[in-house]
Structures are given as structure tokens and as C-alpha cells.
Image (tube, grey):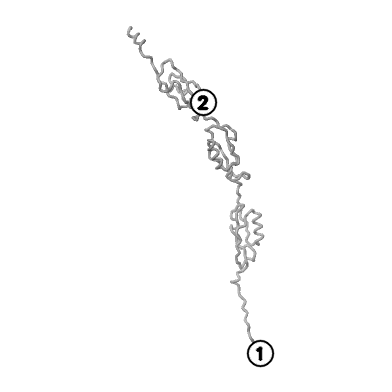
Amino acid sequence: LYNTIFSDLFSPPQKDTVPNLVGQLYDDVSQNSELLGRFTLTIAATVENDAEEGTILEQDPKGDSQVGEDVTEISVTVSAGPKPVEMIDLDGMHYLEAFQALNKAGIAYDTPTYQNDDKVEKDHVISYTPLKGTPITSGTKVQMVISLGPETKTFPMPTLIGMTQKDALNQLALQNLEQGEIIPVYSDTVEEGKVVDQYPAPNAEVSEGDKVNLNVSQGPDPDTQPKEVTNTVSIPNIP
């Protein structure tokens, strides 16, 4: 009995190893009794940091240190995430300029979506979120909509064959089609000044602004037409 009493009095106090929590998320470990053992967690401070929000940055006592039974609490410093930055203005920018501006500001962005727009020039920003001036963190990705320009509508190519050149060009103007090459050709069947052939062909799918080439008749080829031959016949005088 004597030996037992004095053995207990002079034996070294029991110590436990403090779990290393740095780098882990507070929410993940705060209720993990298997990891914490007899220790409880308290948040001593929250600071802005590039680490994900809720990441444990520091702890006291330090991880893997040995502490006595009287130490039951671990105080931690937790990341509040990066300091928010203000969303920049992208209105009307060319998409390459917008990408460069976002990179310079350290703001992430997602793959843009594209749509037709009658007012915003092709390859320029139609809209974006978050809006200008909105505070954003590094986890936020900017969504942009980029213009494809006005929608191009197709329609069947009108038939110009048989029209006069003037009427054919007027028809092109009415359809917002562009005059291409006017090629003079000989034709035995189509009257001079009228369209013999066209490209694109009739009923082919075309869109506004497309160029149309016309072959216009010059009439028959003179080299293929019968030639008049004049012979002079001398008739002798009969007395």
C-alpha cells in the first residue's frame, strides 16, 4: 500500500497528443469526436486569406504537441476566404479585351455563351454577371454573353434568268443581295441585254449580303452567223 501511494504521487502526469487540424475545414472537424478525442474546438479569430473559407490556418496548442489532462480546448484561427474585389465594367468590350481585364483584376470567368444581337457588334459583350461594382470572391466565376451579331436569315435565291440586266439588279437590291460580276456572253436564244444564267442558281439558299454573278446576253455570236457574200457579175453588151 505504501509503495502504491507513493508510486502514484511521483509518477509523471499523463499526456495526450493534440490532433493536427491545420489545413482542414472547421466544419469537417468540429464534430469529429474520433479525431478530436477529449478536445473541443473554439474559434479564436477569423482572418481574410487566400485559403478556402473555413480552412483552419493556425491552432493552439500546436498539432502533434503533448499536453496534460488540464488542457481540453484547442483554439483555432479560421480563414474568412480572400478579400472580396469589386466587379469591373465589361460593357461593350471585345471579348478578348474582357478576358484580359478580368485576368488583370484576378477575377475568374467561365466559358462564355454566344447569341445573336441586332444592336451589339459581333464578338462584343452583351451582358455579364455579377454586375459592375458587385463585391466578389475568388470562388466566383463571371458569366458573359457574347454577341454573334445580327441573325443571318436564309431564303431561296430568286430567279433572274430572262430578266433584263436592269430589272435583275433591282431585284437584287430589293432582296439585300450584292451585285457580283456581270459577265457578257453570246446567246442564240436569249435576247441581248437579258440574263442568260446566274450564280447562285435559282432557289439555292442565300442570305442578305451575298454576292450574285450574272451572265448577260450580247445576242448571237457574230462569228457563228451566216455571212452575206456579194458577187459582182459582168454581163457583156449584146449588139
- The dot on residue 112 is none
Q: Position of residue 219 (x, y in %)?
A: 63, 67
- In the image, taking residue 176 as reference, residue 51 lies left or right, namely left
Residue occupying the point 35% across, 11% down: 10
Q: Position of residue 99 (x, y in %)?
A: 54, 40
Three-letter code for the amino acid on which mark 2 is drawn? Val
Q: Residues within 10 Å of mark 1 (few under 14, many from 20)?
A: few
Front label number (2 vs 1) = 2
Identify whether 180 is placed above or below 104: below
Q: Position of residue 173 (x, y in %)?
A: 65, 55
Q: Quadrant of residue 92?
A: top right
Label 2 or label 1, whichever comes before in sequence order? 2
- In the image, taking residue 95 as reference, residue 76 lies left or right, namely left
Residue occupying the point 57% across, 31% down: 135
Identify whether 167 is placed above or below 87: below
Residue 216 can be seen, yes or no:
yes
- The dot on residue 237 is 1
Check if mark 2's residue and mark 1's residue have beta carbons within 8 Å: no
Query: From the image, which quarter does the C terminus lie in?
Result: bottom right
Query: From the image, which quarter does the N terminus lie in?
Result: top left
Three-letter code for the amino acid on which mark 1 is drawn? Asn
Residue occupying the far bottom of the picture: 239
Residue occupying the point 64% across, 53% down: 176
Q: CA distance from mark 2 to mark 1?
A: 134 Å
Q: Which residue is mark 2?
A: 47
Q: Residues within 10 Å of mark 2 (few under 14, many from 20)?
A: some
Q: SS at mark 2?
A: strand
Q: Position of residue 103 (x, y in %)?
A: 53, 38
